[in-house]
Structure formats: C-alpha cells, structure tokens
Amino acid sequence: MRKKKWVSSFTVFALAAVLIAGCTGNKPQESASPSASPSATSSESPSESPSASPAGPKDGGTLTISTFSDMVSVNPIFINDTASGDLDALIFAKLYDLDRNANLAAEPWSLAAELPQVAADNKTYVIKLKPNAKWSDGQPITAEDVKFTFDTIRNPDVGSPAISTLDKIDTITVKDPQTVEIKLKQVYAPFPYSLYISIVPQHILKDVPAKELKAHKFGVDPAQTVTSGPWKWTEWTQGQHFTIEKDPNYWGEKKPHIDKIVYKIYADQNTEVQALMKGDVQMTEAIPLTQIEAVKKQQNLNVILAPGPQYEYIQFNFKDENFPQKVSPFKSQKTRQAIAYALNRQGMVDNVLKGAGALMNSPFLPKSWADPGDKAVNYAYDPEKAKALLAEDGWKPGKDGILEKDGIRFSFELQYNAGNSRREQVSAIVQQNLKDVGIEVIPKGIDFATWIDQNVTPGKFPAILLGWSLSNPDPDAESIFSSKYFPPAGQNSGWYVNKELDELWVKGQQTVDKTERAKIYHEIGEKISIDLPYVFLYQYGLPQGVDASKVKWAEEDRPESSLAYGYLFHIINWWLE
Amino acid sequence: MTEYLIRRLLQSVLVLFLISILTFAIIHAAPGGPTQVFLAPGLSPEAAKVQAHNLGLDQPVPVQYLKWIGGMLQGDLGHTFKNNIPVGDILWPTVKNTIILMASAWILSLIIAIPWGIYNSTREYGFSDHTSNFISYLGFAMPTFWFGIILQQTFALKLDLLPLSDMYDMDKQGDVGNLILHLVLPVTVLSLGFLAGYVKYSRSSMLEVLNQDYVRTARAKGLKERKVVYRHALRNALIPIITILGLDLPILVGGAALTENVFNWPGMGRLFVEMAVAREYSVLMSITLVVSVMVVVGNLLADILYAVVDPRVQYGRKGGAAA
Amino acid sequence: MSDIEVPPTGKRRNSPQGTPAGIPVPADPPPPGPWKTAAKKFMHNPFAVAGLVIVLIFVLIALLAHKLAPYDPTRIDMMFPNLPAGSEGHLLGTDELGRDILSRLIYSSQISLKVGFSVAIVSVVIGAMIGAVSGYFGGWVDTVFMRLVDVMYSIPTLFLNILILAIFGSKSTYLIWILALTSWMGVARLVRGNYLQLREMQYVEAAKAIGVSDWRIIFVHLLRNSSAPIIVTATLMVGNAILSESALSYLGLGIQTPDTSWGLMLSNAQEFMLTDPLLALYPGLCILIVVLAVNFIGDGIRDAMDPRKTTIPRRRLDQWRTKFSKSGT
C-alpha cells in the first residue's frame, strides 16, 4: 500500500531536484542532430501498439487514467509532483514543447509561434507568441503573461521550486504584445530548456502578493483556474479523482479528439494494475515491474516499456565524520573501482528490471548526444578483479572474513528509501555482491521524506542508493557533482571534490556549439567513470499500460518513454474507440 | 439522572482535553520538533525560519497549543501545507463514505446475527452453534486485508462478478444500485468481523435470561417453549444487546482503514494513510482529534442509551468497577 | 471512576473480563487445588491442547530457525528467481530475488512471535502495575490513571499507531512499544477491579496491621487473584499483536527489510497476486494458524479456570472491539 507511494514521492523529489540542478540544453537550431535520437530506445513493441484504425480518428469518449497519488496544485509555478504535472500538461499550453527527440519545438499547441531567435552574443533570446492564443476566460495570452510567469518564479518570496532554472536571467522585456526579449547574465547553454514551461495568467494573479500566491485558489480550485490548453479542468474530488473536459473555446487550430479525461486515484499500485486488467481504467502510467507479465497476458493490454529519463546510482560519502570510525573508506579511487567491479549490474538489469534498463557508466543517458559511449569505463561484473584491486589498495581479510585496513573494518551502511521494492531488491543484491569480496554492507531502508531531509540534503550518510529523474533533457549536472555545490544548499551531497571536473562542467555550460559541447561531456563522462563519485547503475523505465482496444493513436503520436511525461506525448491527437 | 448526565458530560470534556494534549505532545516530541513536522521537507534553513515564524512555531509551546485548540473549537481544522486546502473539505466527505460502509456492514451483520444467536441459544452445541463458533474463531484470527484481497481476486478478477474497488463506477457516480454492488465485497469482509461477535453475544444474553428464575417459572407453568423464548426471554435479552450496539457506535466512525485501503474506498481510514504518506502531520493530528471526539461522543450517547434502556441501572458512585 | 453501578446482568463494555460487579473473581485466595483442576480441565479440552501444541511448534521453529531453515532468508540467488513450489531444493519455491520462501517463513516466525509475545508481556506489566496501584490506593491516583485509560480507549488506536510510526519512523522496537502502550488498558481495568474488592477484605487489614508493606500486598495479591484472567488476556493479546504487526507492515509502517515478518511477506506478495497467489497464501495461513492456536489456548485457560461459561461471548466481543480499533479492519 503505502510502500508503493514512496516511489511517487521519489519522483516528486527527483523532479524538484533536477529542476534545481538546472539541467538544460542544446540550442534549438541544432536540434536536427541525428545522434540525439532517443527514439531508438523507445517503444519496445511498436508493432503491437495501437496504430491507425481504418476508420481514422474520431471524436468523443472518456479516457480514464489511473494514478496512485493525488494531485497537489496545478499552478505551474508550484508544480512539484507528477500527478499535478500530468494535469498541467493537459490543461496548460506551454511556451515551447519538446519533440520526440527531446528538442525544443514550437508545436501547433505551443504558445510560441517559432523557435527563439538567439542573438550573436548567445545571451539574448527573442520569443514570438502566437497572436490567437487565449485563456479559457477569453482573455488573450500575451507577452505580459510570459514576463509575469518568469518574474514570479524568479521572485524568492514566492517560493517556486523552479527558481534555480531561471537564475541566469538578467532582464525580461516586453517588446510588443506578442514579443518577449530575455537577456541572460552570462552565456548559458542549457537555457533554452527553461523555455519549456507553462505560462500563468497575469490578469488573474497580478494583484496577489508574492507571499500569498501559494495559498491562492488558482491551481487548487477548478472554478478559479483559468486554463490555456485543449482541455479545461472541471472537477477535483480529493483523494478520488480529477476530471478535465474538452474546452469548446480552445484557441489552437488542432483540436483534441477525446472529450473527457478522468484521473482516478488508487491507494496503491497493485489495485491500479488490477483496475487496468478489469477495464476500470484504460491507461496506467507506471506498472510495477513485477506485474508486467500478468498484464501482458491479457490480450487487449499493451505494455510500453523502454528506459526513460531516470537512472539509479550508489553514492559514496567522502566526508570522514559520516562514518562511525571517523574515516571514509571510499577515499581511494581503487577501492571505488573495486566496488564497481564487484557489483553485478547486468544481473540487476536482467532480474530486477526484467531487462527494461540500460547500464550506465556516466551521468549521461545512454544514446543521448552527451553519452560518452565506450569512452566511459564499463565495469563488467568481475569479483576476482575487485578482490585484486582491494588487495592492491591495502585491504586485508580480518578474522571474520571482512576486509580491514589500518585497523578499520570495511563495513558501511547503505541507505535507501524504505518501501521502494526496486531499491530494496537492489540493496539486497549489493549486500550480497560486496559480501562476496569481503565488504560488509548494512542496507537500511528509511522513510523517504525523512531520509531526504535528514540524510541526503545535509550530506549525512555513509553511502546511499538513489536515483535521478531528468525532467529536463540537458546533460548539465554541475550542481550534483561540482564542489561549488556542497550541502545543504547544493546537491553534491557526498562532498565530492574534483577540480578538473568542476571546470569542465562550467565549460560545458558556456559552450553553445553542440559538437564542441558534446566533446566536453564525453570528456567528463570518461573522467567521472574513472573517478567514480557514484557507481552508476542503470537507466530504467516506467512501464506504461494501455488498453489497446480502446485507446488509439497514429504511429507518429505514440507515447515516448524517453521523455518525462512522455506517456502523454501528443495526446491531443489520440482518440478512443 | 440529570446529575449523572452532567458529570458524564464533564468527564467527556476532560477526556477530550487530555486527548488534545496528548496529540499535541506527540507532535512536539517528534525528532526535530514541530518545525520538522509542520514544514515542507527540503526547505533551506532561512526559508524554514520564515515559514516557522509565519506559522507561529517560534512562539512558546502553550501559546501554540491554545491557538491550535482554539482553531479546532471553531471548526478550523487547519490547512494542508502542500496546497493549502482546508482539512474539513477533505475530511467530511470521507466521514460520510466511511459511515456508509461501516453502517451497511453493521446493520447486515445485526440482521443475521441476532436471530441466529437466539436460535443457537435454544439449541446449544448443535450444528448451527458450532458453525457460528467456527466463524467467530476464523473471523478473529484472519488478517482482514488478506481476506479482502482473496475475495477481490476471486470474485472481481477471476469470476468477474463484482466490482474490484471504489464506491461507484466512474460514469455512475451517485447511483444507489451501483453503490450496492461496490459494497458487497468490503461489507462481506467487515461483516465477518461483526457477525461472529454478535451471534455469540446474542446467544449468551439469551441464555442468561433463559436461566433466570422467572423464565423457569414460566416453563414450570407449562407454557410452550416457543412462547417462553419469544415472549418472556427475548424482550429482556434484547436490553443488553441494544446496549452493546450503542457501545459499538464509535467503531463505525473509528473506521476500517485496512478494508478501505484494500478496496480503494474513499473513507477516513484511507485518507489517514494517504496523509501519513504525504507527511501532512497537522492534518493527521486534526483527524485523530476529530475521530476521538466522535468516539467520546459515541460513548456518551451509548451510556445515556444504556441508562435509559435499562431501568436497573442506578446512578451513584459506590463500588462500580466500570468506568 | 464509575458512575453507574451495574447489576449482575448488566453488560459494561469497559470490563474486559466482563466482571464489573457481577461476575466475581474468586473472592478468597484460592487454595492450590483450583490450579491443578484447571490444568486437568485444560488438558481435556482438545482445542486448547491443539492450540498449545501448535504454538509450541511455532516457538520451537522460531528458536531453531537457524537450524531448520534450509537457506539464509536474505540470501539472494539471481539464477533462480520465482521458482514454483516443489522445485528441487526449494520446497515452497523462491521469490522474485531467488530467496527461499520456506526459509523466509521460518525466520518470519521469529519476528512475528517476538512482536506478539513482547507486546503481550510489556502491556500486561504496564497494565497490571497501573491497575494494581490504581485499585489499591484509590483516590486521586485512581482518578488520574482511570482518566488515562479513558483517553487511551477513546483515541482510535490504529490512527495513533500510524501517526507515531509515520513521525518517528518504523523500527521493530518502536512497533513493540507502540503496540504495548496502546493495549495495556484492558489489563489495567481488570486488575483494578480486583483490587477494589481486595481493599475491602479482612486479611488485607490484617496484613497491614502486622506491618506488611503495601507493595508486598499488591504484588502477592496480584499473583494470587488476578493471574488467571491476566494470563487469558495476555494470551489473546499475543494474537492481537501479531495481527496488528501484520496490518502495520501491510501498510508499510511496520517491519522493514532486511528483517522479515509474515505481515511484510504478505505485503510483498500482494504484488504477485496475479502471477503467484500462493506467495500470499503461506504467510496468511501462518498468521491465521498461530492466532487461532493462541485463541484456543486463551479460551481453554478461561474455560478451565472459570466455570461460568456464559461469560465467553463478552470477552470475545471485547476482543473484537480490540481488533477493530487496534489492528484495524
């Protein structure tokens, strides 16, 4: 029951964290680069996916989607969890959207008319809006709304979780009702992805004091939430369901086919899957890996499973005071490498992820343009090599078979969030694998929120098993690995220091040319895979279940697992049979 | 009688006061103190300080308590910290849903249990008696959620006879027929619980009456057994039964957290677990207090009911061991 | 304090023994005889004996787990996950990580029984102490404790447990304390009831007169007069605690991995209801059997000690109430 939910709270955190991490990316002009194509990793079985029926799209019907956590607030300024993010994606038009290859795009349903024009200094962005866009109350959507949204998020009094994504902005100027100019303080290559953002109505919120925005009913009360997307929000019964309906006055040229979408909230993921099998819902965004086989057995159900924008890792702590013996055993590079060799990562992918994952050797998603590929060291499972490395490093077996060095027993606590069954399993495997080479691991499950508060954020732990969810496709991860970002303010929670890498991250942010940038990230990937502040484990996916007999889409509109919220990709073009 | 009522009322108020202090104390005993509990996780120290000030957490503890309890007394159960929704808006609908579920189970089990128990009292240690005994043991020893899951698997998924979970189908909100279908499985789970206890109870109170002198006299007079049972004994046996029902009223609001979770029933128990997951501790506190109020009031009503129904009760303080 | 004097046939919920004033515990210190008679009676009750045997078997299993279990319950074998029951070397098969299910069931009995017995013992000790002091001294001590009992009875226990575990985190020691601290009230009322009678008795006056200390009187009396009903209550509490543990573990608030209990196994098995329902069957059955056995023992003892059969259902009903409010439903 509850346990499955922590997974969701994990996602919540990860999204927030990555927003703070400020990963943003490649310049839109260069988006055509074929190497960027994550679609290579997409749908496992596209042939099974419901393709165009002979009759073609038809209008009408209600789509019921299950979720295991209720939404919190759909005010785009405060969105911090996936359920609210789903609703946001459906009822608000974004300034820009992402295409299948994770490039910034001005889609027919985006507010911007074209990709931003970037000045020669690479610091000035000019954005043109569509003239016909309007709010559900009939007011036009203008440059003032855009400016208001950005300024509000940037205002520290507001407390928006997205504040750090926009901290490189210097000024925002309204040139005319359809044109906004944004000037940056410095060249910042990840910036364009900050434009993948929902805009809020200035005419509704402008008179609300910054500190009271969070308490405002906009985003919480359907009646007071003016929307801009193809559907409008009509109902929310807390803890049970929320409903959206086609907006008859929607401004876009492309209209949605589906009349009504209902999100039904389930107490746990098992009930959710059972509801899918029983036909109570037509789509489930994340099926527990353990239940995939059962779902697949049912003819009409289709499971879309591919690695998505999230990966898991084991993080070492380099700060001595976090260990009972006041010495971090992880300080030697050889020891860290030995641990990497000792872990059967492929075994985890095969058995825990049921094959739906890809090994990671660097912080860049496999097959993305920043992926260093073979340049990063791949630590294949090799316990003997691990033992040899540990011996070289001076570790000797003690009385109980556990390694010792300078009187210190190699034993550490590996923390993870209790109730996440995937991490429970992986931590058990880690314990077993390391025991085989003479290292004692004590896995410890802690309640997620407490854990993040008391251990992860302040950097107080020996070692952790955690994951990052990359809601933003840019490879920049300075705030996770640079020594500029120590806890509690930063997210380098293991107190890792590598001056060379620190500089490379900054260089990556300031290089706009994508080929040059890719080279920098390949170098980072190589260096980090040798130095190992983390043992990168694997990229994993969230299996999406769909009732293929009811939900239909054309091949080009199929869900895209490689994107955050990719399970709703192009939902405006889907239809129901 | 009036004096008794007043004293009983004062007692209830005292108990509630103590409960509120206990709940409040738990929050203040939390590691990291109330700041940890009331504030959103992951705030920077400065932001936390500002928020703590805004919420009045930097004031002396007794002041905080008075503010909190004052709000509660005026029906202000507080707001969720995540999206600032009044707790009452979330809580009251779930109270209704829980009562629908519990009352159905309760009434159903009474309808079955009382006649069954009376029947068993006239045929002690017969087949029917043993059956109810067996059910009673089983019902007590079986983990409720386990039974629920088994029923779901069998009747909803394998046989596809009944709805799996929820209160209504999505497109049939408010439809009574649909509600009844959805009630079948959770009510079965809960009734097994109630049923077992009530059969035994009505059997024993009946037996107790049947062994009394005046019943024996009636028998000795040559009255037919049926008449003895139904005319003389039943009426007296019902008194304790009614009383016990009154005493069980609080169970109805106390809820069925596990059953609600298994069947995705949008009741208080599910809400509570959900809020625990979301770490909305202030909400949890409010719910705990609200439910306690209902329990105390339920107990009070039961006592009054008891006093009214059973004329033999005397009001006074001497020697009673029951409190 | 009570305001209602209840005549013999009146039913008062607040007396777990169902004996507010009406059904007395033996008024005089019983001679050694009754214990023997009771033991004899108990041994003639087939259900009680069966229950005793079953519980003893489970206790033995728990104590000898390291000898009996064919594998280390946390031992992962990625080569053989999800083996069906009857597979070679794995009598009941393996789970999703290749851990031996039989071994896990065996080790689970340790925690489930540990929780069950510890909660029973701790809450009996707390309850007996509070009840004895309260009943013996009376006055404001009594008032304070009895208000506390009222308070504890009025808070929905499951909610309280969830609240505390959510705030303080889940640990098996917390779990035991929390369950114990929310289930001592029955014993307290029962013992107090006894002492109220005791105070009136002549031999106490006599004992006091010859200078026997209050504490000694309390203690000796406790052993003599209240031990039988306390044992009965404690036995039933073991069952209750096991059920509560499984319920909280099911909600994710109880035992955490790498520890294992039947409740936790059930909770994990729920994911596999669609593919391997047997996984949920084993731990569920273990809980069912142990709790049944414990109840048979409890009822057996009570029947053996208490000739008045008609009090059965009232306890059963109290037990129900406890189950509803405690382990939740």
Image (spheres, rainbow, N blue to C red):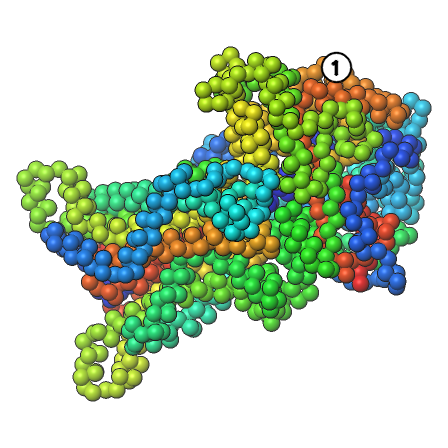
Residue sitting farthest toward the front? C88
On the image, the x and y values in percent for residue A391 come to 58, 16
On the image, the x and y values in percent for residue A55 come to 88, 64
C208 vs B301, nearest the viewer? C208
User: Which quadrant of the structure image shows residue A308?
Assistant: top right
- A138 shown above or below A509: below
Compared across the picture, whether A42 is left or right of B89 comes to right
A381 vs A409, nearest the viewer? A381
Tell me the SS state at disc 1: helix
Residue visible at 69% across and 28% down in the picture: A380
Whether residue A386 can be seen here: yes
Whether residue A242 can be seen here: no
Residue visible at 22% across and 74% down in the picture: B211
User: Which quadrant of the structure image shows residue C124?
Assistant: top left
On the image, the x and y values in percent for residue A229 come to 81, 49
Compared across the picture, whether A241 is left or right of C309 comes to right
Compared across the picture, whether B289 is left or right of A82 comes to left
Residue visible at 66% across and 33% down in the picture: A345
User: Pointer 1: what residue?
Assistant: A500
- Badge 1: few (under 14), some or many (20 or more) residues near its Cα, within 10 Å? few
Considering the image in quadrants, where does the C terminus of chain A appear? bottom right
Tag count: 1
On the image, the x and y values in percent for residue B230 come to 31, 81
User: Which quadrant of the structure image shows residue B119?
Assistant: bottom left
The chain carrying label 1 is: A
Compared across the picture, whether C190 is left or right of A114 comes to left
| Residue type, numbered disc 1 | Glu
C262 vs B4, nearest the viewer? C262
